[in-house]
Image (cartoon, rainbow, N blue to C red):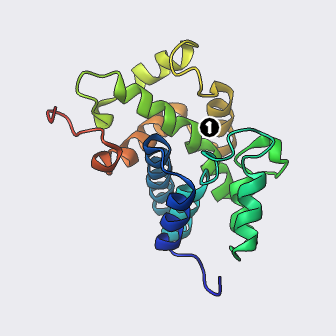
Amino acid sequence: MDHTPTREDAWALLTEFTDNPSLIKHALGVEAAMRAYALHLGEDEETWGIIGLVHDFDYQQNPTEETHLHVGTAILRERGWPEEWIRTIASHADYMGVARESQIAKTLFAVDELSGFLTACALVRPDKAIGEVRVKSVKKKLKDKAFARGVNREDVRRGVEELGVDLDEHIAFVRDAMATISDQLELPPPGQF
């Protein structure tokens, strides 16, 4: 790749390796949260969004710690993606051994598991409206180990800690970012069911 990857490049990469609708929606949710944080922090919205969109592009085909991101980072390098972006993507999984030193890496880690958890919280609502998910309800469900058991609660806790934000504010911020693309996430706005 002779140029900085665009969102179109990122979408093409994601959909080349992923056709599972839930995984695509997860990528879109993380992208929305990353873009919102970039704007909030005065960072490059496009770069942050692209990294959010492709962070798990290889997961469907490589769902284990032995393969996920090991394969993905190799593909990104082969295709000439910026090394700094590749390191940021690799850093969202502790087993990759890449320290999260940059603001973008800490943010990706902090929004990844939480965005999936927020989707699960929206899906159990009668109206499935992501924008109506209450922070108090999310915190209560985080304590319920049986609810969305695939979500790593420790990663959610550490993400907030590393990012240096308040848990309540972080939940509300990511929820509101995801609500801006509720149609793409198939989580309708309130009163639309």
On screen, 142 above or below 14?
A: above
In the foreground, 148 or 41: 148
Q: Residues within 10 Å of mark 1 (few under 14, many from 20)?
A: many
Q: Residue at x 47, y 37 (%)?
A: 169
Residue 7: % across, % down = 48, 70
Quadrant of the drawing holding the N terminus: bottom right
In the foreground, 72 or 150: 72
Residue 48 left/right relative to 40: right
Q: Residue at x 44, y 52 (%)?
A: 28
Residue 52: % across, % down = 55, 56
User: Which residue is the site of mark 1?
Assistant: 160
Residue 131 left/right relative to 12: left
Residue that extends furthest to the right in the rendered view of this protein: 97
Q: Amino acid at mark 1?
A: Val
Asked if one can make out residue 134 in the rendered structure from this viewpoint, the answer is no
Q: Residue at x 65, y 39 (%)?
A: 159
Residue 129: % across, % down = 27, 33
Q: Quadrant of residue 164?
A: top right
On screen, 45 above or below 97?
A: below
On screen, 181 above or below 39?
A: above
Q: Quadrant of residue 165?
A: top right
Quadrant of the drawing holding the C terminus: top left
User: How many numbered discs, if any?
Assistant: 1
Asked if one can make out residue 64 in the rendered structure from this viewpoint, the answer is yes
Q: Residue at x 67, y 50 (%)?
A: 106
In the foreground, 34 or 25: 25
Residue 180: % across, % down = 31, 50
Q: What secondary structure is marked by label 1? A: helix
